Structures are given as C-alpha cells and as structure tokens.
Image (spheres, helix red, strand yellow):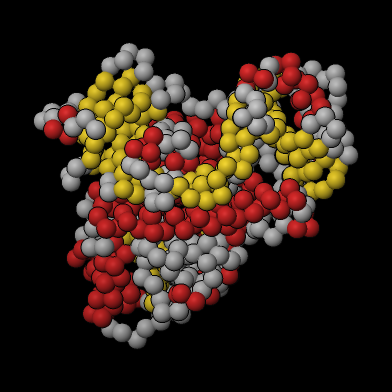
Amino acid sequence: MNTRLSKSSSFDETVPVLVVGGSLIGLSFSLFLARQGIKPLVVERHPGTSIHPRVSSLTARTMEIFRSAGIDEEIRREEPPFPREFGIMFVESLAGQLFDNLMEDMSAYFTDASPVEGNGIAQDLLEPVLRAQAEKIGVDLRYNTELIEFETDEDGISALIRDRVSGDTRRVRTKYMVGADGSKSGIRKQLGIGQHGEGTLFHLISIVFDADIHELFRRQNAHMCFFANDTVSGSLVLYPGTFRRPHIYRLDVIYDPEEETIEDYPEERCMSLVRAAIGIPDIPVTIKKILTWEMAGRVADRFQEDRIFLVGDSARVQPPSGGLGGNTGIAEAQNLAWKLAAVLRGEAGSDLLTTYDAERRPVADYTVEQVVTLSQQREHEGSDGITVSTLHVNMGYRYQDGAFVPEADGKNLPIVQSPELWKGQPGTRAAHIVLERDGNSISSLDLFGSRFVLLVGSDGQNWVEAAKHVKDTLRFPMDIYQVDGHNADFNNPRNDFLDAYGITSTGAIIVRPDGYIGWRKPGTEENKEEMEKVLTNALSTILFR
C-alpha cells in the first residue's frame, strides 16, 4: 500500500471520526454520534439520499432508539399509515386465491413492552429526515464523495477522499473510521476481514414499478405477498405513499446469474412478469427501476480492526424476511456511537471500544441465523411451521459479554427471550414502565439516550447522595433519579418498577446511554462510603477506566 498518506506532515482537514457511507446506517450512526457531542465527517459516493425504498419498516425497538435521539416526531410526520393487521400473504397472485398468512404476528412492531409503535416508513422517505436532522446539528455530510485509500498507524488513520464531480482530492486525518459502505464493503476487504454464515441463498431481479393496485393489497390485508402461479413465482412488496410520493411497488423474482443477466430482463419482459404477479393481464404498469441483488446470510468475522469499525451491511447481511436488516444495523450504530463518544470525550478507556464487537457480533450471528430460518420456514412449511419470533430477535436478546458488570448467575440465563421476561439483568434492555411527575406520564425509556442513568428505589436516598459524590469526583455526567419515596423524582403509579428492574426499595441500577443495563445492586444495607466505592468500581468496569 502507498505509504505517502501516513508520512505526510500536513492534512487538508482533521476530524474525530470519518464515516464512509452515508446511507441509512451511516446517517443514523452520524446522527447518534453528533447527539453525543462528536461531529463526524461523512462521505457518500452517491449524489444524495436513497431513491430506492429498500428498508420498508421500523420496529418498535428501532423507534425507541430514534425516540432517544430526539427525532421520532420528525419520522412520524413522514410515515405512511401502518395498520396493525397487515400480514404477509401467500397467494396465487395479488388478485388471485389466498393460500396462507405467513406473518400473523406483528409484535415486533406493536408490543406492550414498548411505549412506541413501529411504522412502515421506507428508506427513500426516511433518509431525507435523517439527513436534515444530521445537518441541523452540524454533521459534515459530503455526497458525491468517495474514499480512495486509507492507512492506519498507532495514533489514527490517514485517508484520501475524492469529490466525484470535480475530481478534487483531500487528505483527511481522523482518530477513528466507521465503515458503513455496504455489503460489498471495500473497507472490510482491504482489512482482510472474512465472512461466515449461510452465504448466498438466491440471486434476484428486483423490479420497482407503479400500478393501480393498492386496493388489491388492502383486500389481501397485506404489505407483502409471496405468490406462485403457472407463469411466475416470487414476492410483491408495497411501499405505502405519503405526501412526499405515491405508493410504489417492488417485484422480486429469482434468476441464475450464470444463465442470465439484467440485460435479459428488458422492460417488456418485466411488465409481463409484473402483470402475472398481479393477476390482471392488461393492467397498466410503469416500470421505474430494474435491479439485481443477492439474498445472503453473512457476518463479518470481526466488527473491529484497531481504530476501524464495521456497521450495517458491511458487518452483516441477511435475508429481508422479518424486516430486521436495517433495524439491526441501526442498533449497531447506536451501540457504537455512545462508546466512541465516551472515549473521545475522555470519559472511558479505549478498551471500551472492543465491547462493540463483543456485544454486537453474537447478536448478528443469532439474528442472521434466525432470519435465514424464518425465510426457509415460510418457503417450506407455511405459517404452521414458523417458530421464529421477530420480537424476541429484535428486542429480547441479552449481551453475553461487554460493557456491563456481570452477575454470578449470568451464564445460566437464556440468550434470547420475550422482552418482558427480563428483570433488569445486566446486558439486557431496560424495561419500559410508566413513570409520573407533576401529573405528567412518561416512559422510563425517556430517561435514557445521552448519559448514564442511576435509578434507585424508594429507600435509596443513600445511593442518591453517594452517586452525587461519585459524579463530582469522577467528573462524569450521570443522571440520578429516585423512583417513589419521600424525595422521589418520579412516582410509579403501577407499582411495577422494582419488579421490572429486579431490585428492592434499597436497590440501585445503572442504565447505559443505549438503554441497556450496565450494573445493578438488588438491595443493600451498606453506608454511603461503601456505596461510593461500589458505584466507582461499577462505572470503572463498564467504562474500562
């Protein structure tokens, strides 16, 4: 590799973090990082946000993440209607016979375990929202800009970027780099990081089109249909419209790249396939885009190489079954963002960053495995054979190792279960409960998002005093709340806080900025001095100080 970058004594600019790839996951990561006070440089080779709908829904857990970042209301203003009863149907054609419903369970989108609902916003509608919010808070987004080369050394990374319109190049110096450059990630390949998993499942032709078929989807009660008839088999996807654009649709059919290419699918043939899938031979159809893509299950062998991290499709690709690809990538982005920010602000040791791989790669392995299984169950067994719960996969997992203080019985716990069964165990998502202050109700999840939070029970005043002292001594930003009791910050009208978080009235629990439990003490009779030591040790463990 050319060494002129790292040996250069001058750079055109210096940034804390360089993000390569400004699509859904790169934008989300950059927004989360900027919310933590670190403003990255983002380079995206395409001229603007996605024109392809691609990701077609956000789960309740993903909306929790966007809510914690303060942008859920902006997304809600753009979202299309997303009825609870939508399903994934198996039909002869969209206008033909209904055989089965392959997704009666919408709990990943609508669940009592969350204060929010999922929605059906597509990527082409979501990305402009994220872009506007990122630019509003100072993220440097450069479209039509690509990474040409990079080199790493002990102190950082030197990169060469190029404006694809003018051809001008700039040398950039950064402490960390994030690869959000997609399934064919050049960064992953240059680092020599391999992949494992099921590999290629299918190659597909994807036809994006417009036709007057929304009423047919409504009659089938579907947002997606698998179909099979004498002419064609495949899938039809509805991307509901908003005031930004009308409804659009996508047809996917399998093809063999060794026998055919995209040139073998001219517009006339594609229109014929679309009409056969719809089941109305003469229906007017407008073809908007014809693409090829690979359905695969692959996970990178590692998500970190020194100062470089992989997120989204560069780290993991999976079938679209269950709609969890983009949702999983957004969770990866949130996990990495708070850790990078804590290190760059000097609040954590650099070893905290190794927990990104330790936490997220096992989740990626499990998610890809389950999504591949779901795809196979839908294809071969129908609704009666589906065992995969997308709610459990997306919201009910437990980190087995990482930035938290484990408990003695932690290794005996399940890796995944229904989210409401978790009771404050370190490494699990903090539970949603209703809190009240001054007559106003909020979710406990609204307390999390930018800083560490200490929650204590009604008899936990000593924890409050100890935490204030530790906070001042360590110069560490942390919010401290007492639930119920004489000096309560919040009341718990349903009286379910202690049970949901697995503590007693004298207990305490630390929640990380991403809403995951970092430490807990179910109950204590210790004095304030001992509590200060316990809290200091807990934070030092979590943050690798």
Residue furthest to the right in view is 97
Residue 224 in the image, given as x and y percentages of width and height: 72, 39
For the N terminus, give its image quadrant: top left
* Residue 372 vs residue 165, the one in the foreground: 372
Residue 508 rendering spot, x and y as whole percentages: 39, 74
Q: Position of residue 351 (x, y in %)?
A: 27, 58
Q: Can the viewer see residue 482 in this picture? A: no
- Dividing the picture into quarters, in which one does residue 506 lie? bottom left
In the figure, is residue 159 to the left or right of 237? left
Name the residue located 27 percent from the left edge and 33 percent from the top edge: 150
Label tally: 0
Q: Residue at x 41, y 25 (%)?
A: 45
The residue at the far top in this view is 166
Foreground pick, 216 / 71: 216
- Residue extending furthest front? 258
Left or right side of 124 for 534: left
Q: Is residue 26 left or right of residue 469?
A: right
Asked whether residue 401 appears in the rendered view, the answer is yes
In the rendered structure, the answer to whether residue 98 lies left or right of residue 136 reads: right
The residue lying furthest to the bottom in this view is: 525
Above or below, 407 against 174 in this view is below
Above/below status of 283 relative to 65? above
Quarter placement of the C terminus: bottom left
Query: Which residue is found at the position 38% from the left and 40% from the top?
Result: 188
Corner quadrant of residue 253: top right
Position above or below: 243 against 299: above
x and y percentages locating residue 323 in the rendered image? 61, 45
Q: In the image, what residue occupies the spot 17% across and 29% down?
A: 4
